[in-house]
Structures are given as C-alpha cells and as structure tokens.
Image (cartoon, coloured by chain):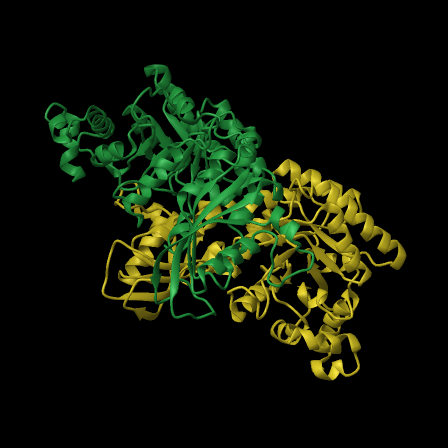
Chain colours: A green, B yellow
Amino acid sequence: MSDRIHATYWLETGDDPARAAETIAGEQSSGTFVALATETPELKARSGARVERLEVLDHSATPSLPTPVRSTRYTRCRLELSWPIENLGACLPTLMATVAGNLFELRCVTGLRITDLRLPPAFAAEYPGPAFGIAGTRRLAGVDRGPLIGTIIKPSVGLSASETAEQVRLLVDGGIDFIKDDELQADGPHCPFDERVRRVMRVVNEAADRTGKKAMVAFNLTGDLDKMRRRHDLVLAEGGTCVMVCLNSVGLVGLRELRRHAQLPIHAHRAGWGWLSRSDALGWDYAPWQVFWRLAGADHLHVNGLRNKFSEPDDSVIAAARSVLAPLMPGAPMTAMPVFSSGQTGLQAHDTYSALGCADLIHTAGGGIFGHPQGVRAGVEALRASWDAAMAGEPLAERARRDAALAGALEFWR
Amino acid sequence: MSDRIHATYWLETGDDPARAAETIAGEQSSGTFVALATETPELKARSGARVERLEVLDHSATPSLPTPVRSTRYTRCRLELSWPIENLGACLPTLMATVAGNLFELRCVTGLRITDLRLPPAFAAEYPGPAFGIAGTRRLAGVDRGPLIGTIIKPSVGLSASETAEQVRLLVDGGIDFIKDDELQADGPHCPFDERVRRVMRVVNEAADRTGKKAMVAFNLTGDLDKMRRRHDLVLAEGGTCVMVCLNSVGLVGLRELRRHAQLPIHAHRAGWGWLSRSDALGWDYAPWQVFWRLAGADHLHVNGLRNKFSEPDDSVIAAARSVLAPLMPGAPMTAMPVFSSGQTGLQAHDTYSALGCADLIHTAGGGIFGHPQGVRAGVEALRASWDAAMAGEPLAERARRDAALAGALEFWR
C-alpha cells in the first residue's frame, strides 16, 4: 500500500479513453478546463492525480447517460486513479469530494461508477472504525456462533409506542436475538422515540431478567445531532444495547459524531441506496461506499439479501457483504457485520453461508418468522435451525425431518 | 398548504401505474411486501402515504433502469404522494429516508426521480434556514446591486498557502467581490487551512484598509465537525466573511451543526451532484434537493452555469437557480443565493439575467477573468460591465463601444 489514495472506476466515454482518463484526473486534482501558467510541471507532478491503469473492456453504440457531446462509439474501461495524500490529508469528507465529486458531470463521461477504493494507513490513524464490530455485537447480543436471528418492526410506521412494545413482547418471548425499527420510524409524534424506548426496554428487560437472554434492539435515533446524542443516552440508560441510524440522512459528520458519543453498537441503514446505485452506469458500488462508513464507525451495515424483494441481483448482494467482512487495511481490519434483509427466510441460509464462508452476520426476516403456523417462537427456531444446518453442511430437508419447527416453516417459506 | 408532506416524482414502471403508485406509497409508510393483520384500515388511514395524483405522460418499450421483472411496456407518469407529518415530525434526516429512501430500489420501479417537495410550516419552525442569505451576503461583500463578481482559486489543488495568497492579491487588486477555494482544497498537508487563511486574509485585510472594499473569500472548511468549528473560528478571527462546505461530503448533520455554530455566510458546494442527477431516470432534481440544504442553513448554493463545461443542460441550470431564489414557504422564504460557475464569462450575463429576472447571485469566472489581455482588473471590470449592460437592457456589443475593458474581453471570450 502506497501513501497514495487509489480509486477504481467503470468508465464509459465517447472520447479517446486515454484523453478522458487524463481529463478526469485533471478535474479531480490540479487541472481545469483551460491550461494555466500556474499549473507548472512541478506542481502537476506533485499534486496531480495519476492514471495508474486504463483497460478497455468493450464498446457501445449509444451512450449510457445523456451527454451534449455525441460520438459514434462509446468505450467502456476500467480506470484506476491515484492521488497523493498531501492533496487532502486523511479527511473522509474531502476524500468524498475528491474520488466522487465533480467527475460524474464531465462531458467526456457517459458512464461512471466508482468500484473500488484503497486508502493509505493515515486514514486508519485518523478514524476509529466500528467500536463493537462482530465480537462486540455477539457479546452484547449473547450469540456466540451463527447469525443473529432478527426482524424488523412492521408496519414500518403507524404503531404506537405501546403497540410496538407488544410486538416486541411476542418476539422476545419467541427467543429472537435482534429487532430493529424501520428506517421510517424515528421520532414521529404518533410514536415518540422516548416513549417507544421506555416501553420496549421494559419488555426486553423483563424477559432478560426471566430468561437470562437480552434481545438486541436497534432503536432508530436518526435526527439532528443533539437529538441523536440525547436519544442514545436514553437507550443506554434504559439498558438498551444498540442504536440505528440512516447514513444517507445524517451524512458522514452525523455518523462520525454519533460514533464519538456512542457507547453502543451503531446499526447503519442505507435507505437511499437506490439513488446511489440503481443505474448500472452511474454512481457507487457498495465496496467503496462502505469504506467511508466503516471508517466513520458503523458496526452493522445493510446489504439487502439473496433473492430479495427489491431489484438488486444476488451477486451484488454477496459482493457487498464480502466487502463489509473484508479487512479494511493491514493492521486495521475494522470489520463490520453485514445485515441481510428483504424477503428473507431460512431458505437463503445455505446459499448465504456458502457464499460468505462464515455466519458473522445479522439475518432479519419478517413474514418468514411471523408467518409460522406454530407461532413466532417456531418461526425464530426454524430460521436458526436453517443456519445450524447450513453451518453443519446438512441439507435443509434432511434437518427438517428431525426439526418440527423447520418442517412447519418449509411449508410456508416456499 | 396542508399539514402533510408532498413529494412529486417522475416514475417509470412496467407494472400497472396505479398499482406501482400504491406499492411505493406502502413501502414508504405503513405497508410492506406482505399483508399484515396489524396494518389495520384505521392504521392505514392514519399513517399511510396517499397517492394524491397520478398522470400518465408517455410509454417506452424498454426499461430505463435494470430490473428483474420484464414487461412489454413501461409507463412514465407524474406521481404525487403525501404523508402525514405525524409519521416523522419535522425532522430533515427522517424526511430524506421517507421521500428518498428505499423506494428507488423497488422492483416495480424502472425509473424514479424526485422532482418536487413541499413541506408543512413545522419544518420552518424547526430549522433556521440561511442566516445571511442575499441581503446578508450583499452587506458583507459590499455589493449593493448586481451579482457578486467572483472566481475560484486555480489550480484546484497544488498551490501552497503563500502561492494562494499571491493569487488572491492579484484578484483583490483587480477589484473582485468574491473568491472561493476549490472543493478539493480544504486542509491538505501541502496547503494547510490555517496557514492559507492567515496568509490570504492578510492580503485581503491590507487591501480593505487601503481601498475600503473587502473581498469575500469562501474558505473551504469541509471536514469533521470539531475541525469545521475551529476553522470557522479562525476565519472569523482573521476578519474573513465567508466559509465554504461540501454538502454531500458532510451531510445534513454536518451542515446543520455548522449553521448552529457559524457567524458567517455558508457557501454550499454540491460536489457529487453528478451521481445524484446525471441519469435522467434516477435520483434527484435540484428543486427538492436544495429544500433540505436551505432549511439546514445554506446561504449560497451552486447551480452550474449557462453553456457550462459540464454536461448539464441550460434549462436544468435555470430551473435550479430559480428554485434557490423561490420562497420556501409562506412566511419563511429562506431565500439563498445561487452560484453560477463553469465556463462562465460576461457572455452569459444577459441570458442569465433575463432567465432569472434578477441579479441576486454570485457569478464566478476563471479563464474569463484571468485571460483578459489587459489583466485581472480589466477581466473583473468586463464581467461587471456585462452585468450592468444586462440589467440596463443594453446589448453587450453596444456597451463594449464605450467600455475598453469589455471590448478587450469580447475578443477572447468568444
């Protein structure tokens, strides 16, 4: 790893690819649209972004994104750029403006997607990364092995605080490991945060006193900074073990300040991920995006799920989860826990496990738990049994022959 | 204006548009992928998002965005949804997760762009809006009428602090109103923020002592919160009159906290706007996007410029500038100042003025000023003369006949 910042892109251009690459490198460092006498060769050598690699992948007859400059052929390439750390220092916000700033608007660009990001060690010295990560989350949730079996409070929004607590009662009585608020539910007048936390934690604490197991509840404290801090303190005071925040809503400064203040794991939701990623030809791959949020302190990161009910394909889901589990840099792994959700049941356990090679994750199911004909407890047990089987290399149908809860689940999961 | 939140979208769907609209409304409020007994009719009536309007615009044979659900025909519509404020309260971060969260990832969506946002008065009661806006900026810059004539320090990055100050000296000696850092230049080791501010302000203050005119310099303080606060205080202590921040880099919490702390106008840069907007079928129009940042406290908002060197078309630029100048809601105008940049010269003055009907803006030019054969002062004068002519309804060529600086500029602007 050099002391330079490296970013890789999928680029489409109607221009000569080498010229387009230099235009992008220039725009994002010392260059501008016109040649300047003050951009001396020395300055450029010292401060200019460098084209490290440019590989042509294929061509297209039409541009992927609208452009005022037409061409007869658009070339798709893999482009790697690097920047000297001296340009910006180890600053995540300015890093974002550098690797993902104005370049997407350039005329020579008809498609641009950031696909990878590698940072020098200075960033790990400046930013804390997750405070709890996998080990801290397992400890607080009391789950030594296998995924945290979880669910999301539904309806997303509309239940009162006491109705929410009643739903939580069903879930903790059923032995669930993890519960989260919906991203739409933070501190609405109909279900105020404080009242929700107090009522839910009363249920969770009573069950913990009774059974010795305290379910982890990720309370969505997304909001302005003073309110997030105050809400965190309330969750902590009530014996809660997790807070949740929407990353695109609060931004890098929001997460960084929450991490600075927090004494609990931060469950990071990616609501808005669609506008960052849904076009193949624009925006962000998950791998470079999650680097920012892990450095800033996210403990859990949402990655969608296999065969989900959204539009994301499975390979993208697995690539995202792998990136969250991969060490960030030598000596600073800063590993976070991927969160699988959306249309999830035990049917995805084997494929998820074999794709990741581990079960250091949170697996949330809604209908897959609540829909069990024998009730919530059986739903939780069936999902857990699916993972036990996956980790043991045992086919699901085989395990179902000696597991009534799983057998019942297979009826309605299909 | 009702007490509901209203958002409008351009939607493309391969599904029945009415069903897709209900799916989106459900996903972003009380619904989920499966029918739940707890989503009672009462709950839905109280907390569900409502389809207010759905107008079919046209059709397409192919989907704009990748989707796993193929159809023979994709319908484009204008969709307006509304939400009760009781779901979330007047909270900008949760508003973002609500109007621009998971909906972009839905399978039934093959194109989705948020085009308008109208908020109930509770948001203006909760958020401060710009502290300075147009009037405060004019007062601090000493510019009573016409645009602030401005420029950007170039090369973007690579000059040392003292080299930056030398460039500023040329500009203030030339009578410029406004200077800004590039978005790539914040606090890099090669040009540390503190040293840059001290050196630049020495030049600016000396000129102000001499001439009575103090140029406004927007120092880019983008970074972590503690650093942004400290940097702001330094700018203030050194007699500076503006700070700049990259919105997508610091997020809503970053801007909100800076606004809370700041005693200077906040110049808001939109680096990254390309990944929010470059696909016609995805993401954000500027009008709804700038609502968030104005409420949180942006005084100046970048809008690109007419005939700019990026890919944005002129109608989009003008729509963006108009949205920044339009009152946010009755009794709370919260007007900000649009910033025009990129390939700008006096040649755009007439068209910009006639499109906006006012000159409450910052017009920045680089080559358009530095390239003047008679020097920087003539470059500034020529740009100012173009605006004087535009506001007086006088053709540029006519004014050039009695303005030597403008005549010289017309030679190289073309």
**Residue A414 % position (x, y):** 16, 40
> Residue, x 79% and y 78% (percent of image)?
B403
Q: Quadrant of the C terminus of chain B?
A: bottom right
Q: Nearer the viewer, residue B102 or B280?
A: B280
Q: Nearer the viewer, residue B126 or A388?
A: A388
> Residue, x 68% and y 39% (percent of image)?
B229
Question: Relative to residue B171, is residue A326 drawn left or right?
Answer: left
Q: Is residue A358 above or below residue B324?
A: above
* Image quarter of residue A358: top left
Question: Relative to residue B259, is residue B318 drawn left or right?
Answer: left
* Image quarter of residue A386: top left
> Residue, x 57% and y 37% (percent of image)?
A225
Q: Is residue B398 above or below residue B200?
A: below
Question: Relative to residue A37, is residue A57 drawn left or right?
Answer: left
Q: Nearer the viewer, residue B86 or B402?
A: B402
Q: Is residue B118 visible in this depiction of the protein?
A: no
Q: Is residue A360 visible in this depiction of the protein?
A: yes
> Residue, x 26% and y 53% (percent of image)?
B68
Q: Residue furthest right?
A: B210
Q: Nearer the viewer, residue A113 or B339?
A: A113
**Residue B168 % position (x, y):** 76, 55
**Residue A244 % position (x, y):** 45, 34
